[in-house]
């Protein structure tokens, strides 16, 4: 990251006299430690900001930047009986997904996370990016209502495990609590 960008990032993360720790490199440590750090950074990014688009955009970027081996990181919002594409990092993706369809729509229908080790073995998987081989979808739940999903795709088969699921579920809760939906 160039100096000017680093300075801008530092300003973005500055809260009064306290500077939230942030560095140019990816979050390091065990997978659990990385998610704990991302939860901390997400809370810092969302502090004082309730806008859904702004916060989902920053969460997509945070995950896309820090989590290794991803080719897509983003959010879909539930509108009526369809998911509609929200902020993301990665190649352009399908815009609308019906509830019950694909991995994302299945997560909404079940109101639970869906971890897919091999997307080619998931009936009805929607291939937005042919590079994707595994996927993790976590619903955004508020008072039992589904607001949308977080979707992560990887070019690696079997990229996601229970630690990823718990970590992204923790990030989903931070996002839901932070925004005015
Ligand atoms: N694979 C998803 C579609 C969304 S893209 O991966 C970004 C699905 O099956 O629902």
Image (cartoon, helix red, strand yellow):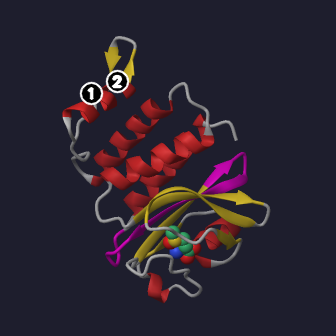
Q: Residue pushed farthest right?
A: 80
Above or below for 126 versus 114: below
Tell me the CA gap for discs 2 and 1.
6 Å
Q: Position of residue 52 (x, y in %)?
A: 61, 42
Q: Residues within 10 Å of mark 1 (few under 14, many from 20)?
A: few
Q: Are marks 2 and 1 in contact (CB under 8 Å)?
A: yes
Quadrant in the picture for residue 173: top right
Dot 1 falls on a residue whose secondary structure is: helix
Q: Is mark 2 within 8 Å of ligand 1?
A: no
Q: Which residues are magenta?
A: 140-159
Per the rendering, the mark at residue 7 is 1
> What residue did someone put label 2 on?
11
Which residue is found at the position 31% from the left and 51% from the top? Answer: 66
Q: Is mark 1 within 8 Å of ligand 1?
A: no
Which residue is found at the position 44% from the left and 68% from the top? Answer: 91
Above or below for 144 versus 131: above
């Amino acid at each position: 990251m160039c100096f000017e960008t680093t300075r801008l990032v530092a300003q973005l993360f500055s809260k009064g006299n306290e500077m939230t720790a942030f560095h140019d490199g990816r979050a390091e440590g065990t997978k659990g430690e990385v998610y704990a750090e991302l939860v901390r950074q997400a809370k810092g990014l969302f502090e004082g900001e309730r806008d859904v688009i702004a916060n989902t955009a920053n969460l997509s970027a945070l995950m896309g930047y820090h989590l290794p081996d991803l080719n897509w990181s983003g959010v879909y919002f539930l509108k009526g009986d369809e998911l509609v594409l929200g902020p993301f990092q990665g190649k352009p993706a399908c815009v609308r997904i019906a509830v019950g369809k694909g991995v994302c729509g299945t997560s909404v229908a079940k109101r639970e996370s869906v971890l897919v080790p091999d997307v080619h073995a998931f009936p009805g998987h929607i291939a937005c990016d042919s590079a994707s081989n595994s996927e993790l979808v976590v619903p955004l739940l508020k008072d039992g209502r589904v607001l949308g999903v977080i979707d992560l795709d990887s070019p690696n088969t079997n990229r996601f495990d229970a630690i990823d699921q718990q970590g992204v579920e923790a990030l989903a809760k931070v996002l839901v609590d932070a925004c005015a939906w």
